[in-house]
């Protein structure tokens, strides 16, 4: 069994910030992010060493139990011995560590290890030197049998520092993390809320994808997430909430197009798609450092289909309101979306992103509807998508023959 030990003892550098463990970064406390790392490593028991049972600690307990693991709070290092068996592995994460690096999770997942960083750079972030060249990166995995040595130390010893010394003396191998994790803000040790707030923007810029001229919708959504994402997370707005709102907007566009106007419907479905892409971007921030579940990708894929369904219905409505003409109207609308999806499936990343973009498409269709040429506009787009697909297939065939 894997057991995790989180320390909630150190106070932040600024008195009003309280404990280091409850400093917030991108809408989550450091303790919550460390908890996500521990659960991602398969820890079935979470032990917190703390001097009081504060309200945030109770919230952590609920999250642990909701994930199917067991939660314990201890106040003295020696109490850890009764919770660890010789055959267990103990994952230790130090106070104040911001665990956002997948590289660290991969090293810890391999088993017994003391993670290190180059001392010269790591000391500036408050990491502890362990030799001339290396500093402890604030995380380690130690065999359960070594934990018994805590009983030989004074009752008031620092449990985390003591376990580090025991691991080093017990021959636990050291594994070095890349120095760039410090400069990228993905594995640092925070001492105050102001330090966390200062680090957030540069970390966010590196996390979100770079602007893509072929994907104006995604580029805009990522920019909006970078601009206001932290504020939304701090207010308790989750990525799932944005995606849920996107579903509502996309579905609402259909009756809105029927009862109000197809132009309003197109603009609403565009808004829904943008909310969904913003939710995906916000999800990158929200789940960074946590175990990946894949639910976000499935929700985003489902939303793409709902958006395209709404576009099909709106194009059919805009082409004509006669029910007798709906088979033809629906066929033309379905043919448009199918052509764009075929184009997206055939081409490379750039053109695929452009064909899948649903920011420009609804705007174009709304403008065509306003000008009274929606049918002709949809047909031109369909033709262009088919020409692009055929040209790509012929070019690919020539390259293959050559």
Image (cartoon, helix red, strand yellow):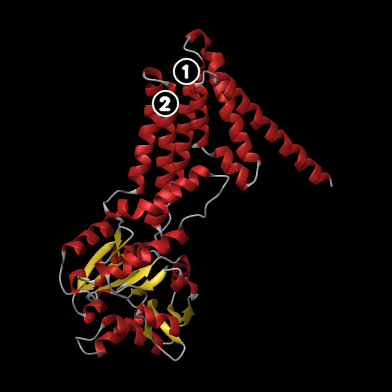
Whether residue 389 sits left or right of residue 155 in the image: it is right
Residue 317 tag number? 1
**Would you place residue 313 above or below residue 152 in this image?**
above
Element type at mark 2: helix
Identify the residue at image location x=16%, y=66%.
54
The reply to whether callout 2 and callout 1 are in contact (CB within 8 Å) is: yes
Q: Can residue 340 be seen at all in this image of the molecule? A: yes
Whether residue 232 sits left or right of residue 337 in the image: it is left
Which quadrant of the view contains residue 352? top right
> Where residue 253 sits in the image (x, y, percent)?
40, 27
Name of the residue lying farthest toward the right: 402
**Would you place residue 372 above or below residue 213 in this image?**
above
Binning the other alpha carbons within 10 Å of mark 1 as few (below 14), some (14 to 19) or many (20 upward) gives: many
Which quadrant of the view contains residue 168? bottom left
Name of the residue lying farthest toward the front: 371
**Would you place residue 2 above or below residue 300 in this image?**
below
> Where residue 100 sits in the image (x, y, percent)?
41, 65
Q: Earlier in the sequence, mark 2 or mark 1?
A: 2
Element type at mark 1: helix
Whether residue 60 sits left or right of residue 243 in the image: it is left
Residue 265 tag number? 2
Whether residue 141 sits left or right of residue 379 in the image: it is left
> Where residue 71 sits in the image (x, y, percent)?
24, 64
C-alpha gap between disc 2 and disc 1? 10 Å
Which quadrant of the view contains residue 353? top right
Count of numbered badges drawn on the protein: 2
> Where residue 61 sits in the image (x, y, percent)?
23, 61
Q: Closer to the camera, 300 or 85?
A: 300
């Amino acid at each position: 069994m894997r057991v995790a030990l989180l320390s909630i003892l150190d106070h932040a550098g600024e008195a009003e910030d309280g404990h280091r463990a409850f400093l917030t970064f991108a809408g989550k406390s450091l303790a919550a992010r460390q908890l996500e790392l521990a659960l991602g490593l398969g820890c079935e028991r979470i032990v917190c060493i703390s001097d009081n049972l504060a309200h945030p600690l109770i919230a952590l307990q609920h999250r642990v139990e909701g994930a199917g693991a067991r939660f314990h709070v201890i106040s003295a290092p020696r109490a850890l011995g009764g919770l660890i068996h010789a055959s267990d592995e103990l994952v230790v994460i130090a106070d104040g560590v911001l665990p956002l690096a997948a590289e660290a999770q991969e090293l810890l997942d391999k088993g017994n290890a003391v993670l290190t960083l180059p001392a010269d750079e790591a000391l500036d972030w408050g990491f502890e030197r362990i030799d001339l060249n290396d500093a402890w990166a604030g995380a380690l995995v130690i065999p359960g049998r070594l934990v018994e040595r805590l009983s030989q130390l004074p009752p008031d010893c620092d449990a985390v520092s003591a376990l580090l010394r025991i691991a080093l003396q017990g021959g636990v191998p050291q594994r070095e993390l890349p120095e760039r994790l410090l400069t990228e803000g993905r594995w640092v040790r925070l001492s105050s809320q102001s330090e966390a707030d200062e680090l957030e923007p540069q970390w966010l810029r590196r996390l979100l994808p770079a602007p893509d001229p072929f994907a104006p919708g995604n580029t805009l959504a990522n920019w909006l997430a970078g601009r206001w994402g932290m504020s939304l997370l701090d207010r308790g707005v989750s990525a799932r909430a944005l995606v849920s709102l996107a579903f509502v907007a996309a579905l609402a566009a259909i009756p809105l197009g029927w009862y109000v106007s197809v132009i309003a419907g197109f603009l609403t479905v565009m808004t829904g798609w943008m909310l969904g892409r913003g939710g995906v971007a916000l999800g990158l921030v929200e789940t960074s450092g946590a175990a990946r579940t894949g639910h976000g990708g499935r929700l985003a894929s489902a939303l793409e289909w709902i958006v395209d369904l709404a576009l099909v219905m709106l194009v059919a409505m805009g082409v004509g309101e006669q029910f007798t003409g709906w088979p033809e109207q629906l066929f033309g609308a379905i043919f448009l979306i199918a052509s764009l999806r075929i184009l997206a499936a055939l081409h490379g990343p750039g053109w695929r992103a452009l064909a899948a973009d649903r920011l420009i498409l609804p705007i174009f269709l709304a403008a065509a509807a306003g000008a009274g040429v929606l049918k002709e506009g949809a047909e031109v787009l369909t033709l262009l998508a088919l020409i692009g697909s055929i040209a790509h297939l012929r070019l690919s065939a020539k390259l293959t023959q050559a």
